[in-house]
Amino acid sequence: MLKKSRIAGSLLLAGTLFLAGGCGYKTEPLPPDSIVPMAIDDLRYSVSEKSVILKWTFPKETIRGTDLTNVTSFDVFRAVVPLKDYCSTCPIPFQVAMKVPGGLVDPEGNRQGAYETEILRSGHKYFFKVLARTSWWAASADSNIVTFVWHVPPSGPEGLSIKVADASAALNWQPVTTLHDGQAVEYPLSYQVLRSKDNKAFAAIGEATASTAFTDNSIINGQTYYYQVQSILMIEGNPVSGGLSGSESATPVDLTPPAPPVGVTAVQTAKGIKIFWDKSRDADVKGYRIYRRSAAADAPKLIGDVPAIHNIFEDTNVTADSKFYYSVTAYDQAETPNESVKSREVSLRH
């Protein structure tokens, strides 16, 4: 009887183990939050006539908020859809990931990841997303998705010329008529003006325009700026970035003179004639010039120049029986000073 009980107990234990072992995992094991990176949220791209370059910032924290020291790799996902088959409400058919090496994380969050591909097909819409990994089983959520349409791009504009004026630069260029492969342009074309202060880091200014002219009124006199113009092809509402013009520099100059002085007065002194005027309200006035005209002369002559801190000048080169008319101008601090028109003429009050 005891032997039978032992056999029954063994069968019960075996059955219990069988049931426990048959349960298994219903989902994949999850990595701890302490090693899962935060999702990338600044995925961006730039397209040239030959390739697309993706860039993003390394995540520096885990989803728990702890510091991340290393990213082993990045998975880049790509989807390609012919424009004629594109459906805005359909799932995006992302393809198998492409691996990009990771590395140590910059604690300041400045390290950048990058991926470039030249495998592009004309007339197709592209989608990209990226995720970061700290191990084969610990990956971040998907990044933001970037998308663009690629087509054989238009050529870059030629003949860029710039005419500078007071705090402005007027750009003109020739229209683009061909694509990069020599075919004629068949879609609407626009142009984006780019500006830089070092001829390296160019950024778009203003909106893209169909015109072949653009005036930049947001610049400072005396500062050198560099400009490029990029052609943009519009295909069914999708912009396709084209080639760039060569860069041209421009240094706007101050061409606006101050207002002429007012309140000009001439009075007799023991030594000659003193001329007074009201100080200019223009902040960039550097000085004043005093002119004198004799009664018999048609044009006045320059007889004095005083700095802006003064508003008085004495003419001692006169005789008692002389009849003179005086006028004053203001000039600014430009490298080549801009001089105002002459004030009204005044003479001695008798």
Image (cartoon, grey):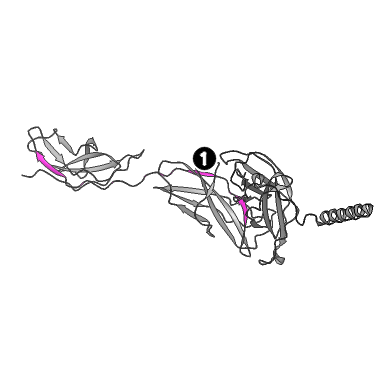
Front-most of residues 296 and 135: 135
- Residue 269 placement (x, y as % from top left): 8, 36
Q: Is residue 88 above or below residue 323?
A: below
Q: Is residue 260 magenta?
A: yes
Front-most of residues 103 and 222: 103
Q: Of all residues shown, which one is farthest toward the left? A: 350
Q: Of all residues shown, which one is farthest toward the front? A: 1
Q: Is residue 123 above or below residue 288?
A: below
Q: Is residue 44 magenta?
A: no
Neighbours of disc 1 within 10 Å: few (<14), some (14-19), many (20+):
few
Q: Give the residue displayed 73% in from the left and 60% down from the top.
A: 93
- Residue 66 placement (x, y as % from top left): 60, 43
- Residue 270 placement (x, y as % from top left): 7, 33
Front-most of residues 241 and 4: 4
- Left/right of residue 295 with respect to residue 8 in the rendered view: left
- Residue 322 placement (x, y as % from top left): 10, 39
Q: What residue sits right under mark 1 in the picture?
A: 198
Write the start and end of the magenta stretch as one range: 239-268
Residue 106's image quarter? Answer: top right
- Left/right of residue 249 with respect to residue 45 in the rendered view: left
Front-most of residues 259 and 161: 259
Amino acid at circle 1? Asp
Q: Quadrant of the N terminus?
A: bottom right
Determine the secondary structure under disc 1. loop
* Residue 323 in view, yes or no: no
* Residue 320 in view, yes or no: yes
Q: Quadrant of the C terminus?
A: top left
